[in-house]
Amino acid sequence: MAKVAREMVERSGVDVEKLLELLIKNAAAELTTYYYYTILRANLIGLEGESLKEIAEVARIEDRNHFEALVPRIYELGGKLPDNMKEFHDMSACPPANLPENLTVEEILKVLVEAERCAVRGYTQICNMTAGKDHRTYDLALAILNEEIEHESWFSEFLGEGPSGHFMRRGETSPFVSKFLK
Amino acid sequence: MRKFTREELKEFNGKNGKPAYIAYRGKVYDVSHSFLWKGGRHQALHEAGEDLTEGLKEAPHGEEFILKFPVVGILESSTDLEGR
Ligand code: HEM
Ligand SMILES: [Fe+2]
Ligand SMILES: [Fe+2]
């Protein structure tokens, strides 16, 4: 734990226990999404599905990066991850991104886009709670939010909601979060 | 339809196997089966058994998420009965 770092956040008026619970729940969402996306990606098959494997994979790897970037901040602030993996899964800030019953590419895309939208909501909340107060958590949550918004727009483009406005990643993943992973 | 006082609503806090009910704009919704209301707790910031109409104004989503849950009653003395 980083005692003074935590004290600075407390003194700025942030309820650190609530913030920690949110950070842990969102870390749980990231790691479980990484798992569920593995299954979703495997089921993106056929002419249509194959072309989406690549973005599903990038979104999957970036979610794992989000998990890894959140963990140090949780410990710095005096929190910890649950000992039990099942407990961790069940406290996720987002519902499980289960494989849909009807295994069409469109139904899989809907699951993916909903998972990203849940994440966009979660990090917006953390940014709102920490803006101007907990600078380091804000910086991290904002970096993650930038990537979640890109994920949402990639998938929504394929659902016919209009252009995402950007290109695929060229090589490297996590352009915003990578500074927290070095 | 059942009428709940604020006091009665408090019982349905989702703790110890009790159902989780939330009031929103005069109506009482049953969110017991929601993954995101386990144990009557939502996102570390909200608890079931309460009128959360005000809380939603600060939330990162709108009422569309609430309206899909079953209505189990109305909240007595609610000043806002406009909820659908
Ligand atoms: C400010 C604090 C809040 C935060 C951070 C928050 C966050 C969230 C998030 C991230 C979701 C998932 C959305 C998605 O899947 O895209 C959600 C769903 C939901 N929220 Fe909130 N929310 C807050 C306040 C509230 C309040 C005050 C209410 C009730 C009046 C509420 C009722 C719900 C319901 C009923 C769902 C749907 C659950 C389900 O489908 O199982 N939330 N919330
Ligand atoms: Fe993520
Ligand atoms: Fe994502």
Image: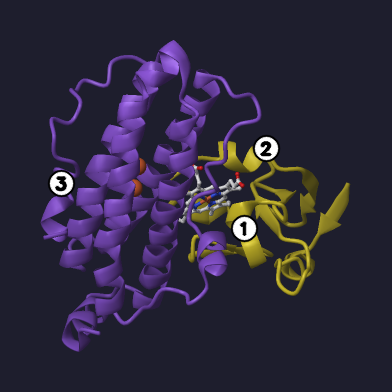
Chain colours: A purple, B yellow
Q: Residues within 10 Å of mark 1 (few under 14, many from 20)?
A: many
Label 3 is placed on what type of residue? Phe
Q: Nearer the viewer, residue A132 or A16?
A: A16
Does dot 3 land on a helix, a strand or a loop?
loop
Q: Nearer the viewer, residue B32 or A113?
A: A113
Mark 3 vs mark 1, foreground winner is 3
**Residue pointed to by mark 2:** B68
Residue at (21, 88) in percent of width and height: A3
Side (left or right) of A157 relative to A181 = right
In the rendered view, would you say A175 is above or below B8? Answer: above
Earlier sequence position, callout 2 versus callout 1:
1
Q: Is residue A65 visible?
A: yes
Quadrant position of the C terminus of chain B in the picture: top right
Residue B43 horizontal/vertical position (percent) = 49, 60
Mark 2 vs mark 1, foreground winner is 1
- Numbered circle sitting on residue B37: 1
> Does the residue tagged 1 have its C-beta within 8 Å of any atom of ligand 1?
yes
Q: Residues within 10 Å of mark 2 (few under 14, many from 20)?
A: few
Chain of the residue where label 2 is placed in the rendered structure: B
> Does the residue tagged 2 have its C-beta within 8 Å of any atom of ligand 1?
yes
- Pointers 3 and 2 in contact (C-beta within 8 Å): no
Residue B14 horizontal/vertical position (percent) = 71, 66
Q: Is residue B50 visible?
A: no
Does dot 2 land on a helix, a strand or a loop?
loop
Label 2 is placed on what type of residue? Lys
Residue A163 horizontal/vertical position (percent) = 28, 15
Side (left or right) of A63 relative to B46 = left
Mark 3 vs mark 2, foreground winner is 3
